[in-house]
Image (tube, rainbow, N blue to C red):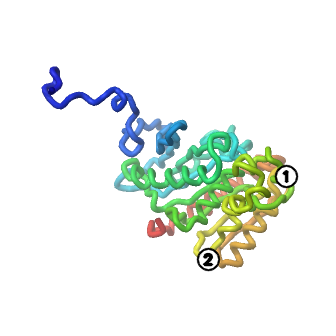
Amino acid sequence: MADAVSGGAPPAPPRELIAAPHPDAAPLPRAAEHPSGVRVLRGVPYREVPGSRPLELDLWLPPAASPARPAPLVVFVHGGGWRRGRRDDMGLRLREWEPGPFERIAAAGLAVACVDYRLSGEAVFPAQTDDLRAALRWLALRGPAAGVDAGRFVVWGESAGGHLASLLALDRTAPRAAGAVVWYAPGDLTAPRGGPDPRRPDSPEALLLGGAPAALPERAREASPLAHVHAGAPPFLLLHGAGDTMVDPSHSTSLAAALREAGVPVELETVPGADHVWYGLGDAEVEDLFARSLRFAARLLATADGSRA
């Protein structure tokens, strides 16, 4: 029987009506504009995972970005040992910046997507890289309406986020990045390299993998960027504190050596006096590392044509 009020089809059941719109079709939130002209859309859902929280991203847009003039993209992946962290946090030494690091990147003409992913207490690897691939798919679908050219993107991550960014850049099946900026990140989960012993069942690596790496050697290898280096990989910038007590610098030096051997352009700097998260450096030194990273990303995106996607 037709709906007595509308005269049309029977109404949908409440179960279908109460669900939030799917991220592929949900209206984008209103952008907040900063005095610099940079705009930010916060808490934009990009993926629904059954039984889990909605996954969201923040999207920072340059002043001139529009559907007619889309901006190239930086996909930022946060750290936190795969166990904690926030998508809008670039690390200890950058938290109090004003303007913040993402506004600065957008002011330089690059859009930024700061992306949630499931933490190790929610799901084990490879859920995290699955989420990042889903974010890239969503950005390719919805980005153009916001003024984002997701076909031209660089991944940028710090610590555990740098590890995931490396995997994304080295993935032969995901949309292909123009480059990767990686700060003090694990590159090899298969063996101890200083810092917390990954053989412990409660180590960050074990919690990510669902068991100690020694007990899950194939999964540990699959989760190691070092095992995925190939000749077609994009350029890498690897920055790592020479005195890092949490992620040994050999993670970056080994990855750089493997990339060079494969013929992949790579810049590596082990930064004297720096512990993890740039602890121990002066403010000007941290500013310089950020500026170097931004220049690297902007240079690659200026020459990218979107054909890598």
Of residues 218 and 94, which is closer to you in this image? 218
Graded by Cα atoms within 10 Å as few (under 14), some (14 to 19) or many (20 or more), the crowding at tag 1 reads some
Graded by Cα atoms within 10 Å as few (under 14), some (14 to 19) or many (20 or more), the crowding at tag 2 reads some
Q: Which mark is residue 231?
A: 2
On the image, the x and y values in percent for residue 104 come to 58, 48
Q: Quadrant of residue 243?
A: bottom right
Of residues 195 and 66, which is closer to you in this image? 195
Which residue is drawn at the image coordinates 60% and 42% (left, top)?
87
On the image, the x and y values in percent for residue 218 come to 70, 62
Q: Is there any visible trace of residue 69 in the rendered image? A: yes
Q: Which mark is residue 197?
A: 1
Which part of the image, by quadrant, shows the N terminus? top left
Which residue is drawn at the image coordinates 52% and 43% (left, top)?
57
Spatial separation of the CA atoms under disc 1 and disc 2 = 31 Å
Callout 2 secondary element: loop
Of residues 141 and 240, which is closer to you in this image? 141
Dot 1 or dot 2, earlier in sequence = 1
State the count of labels: 2
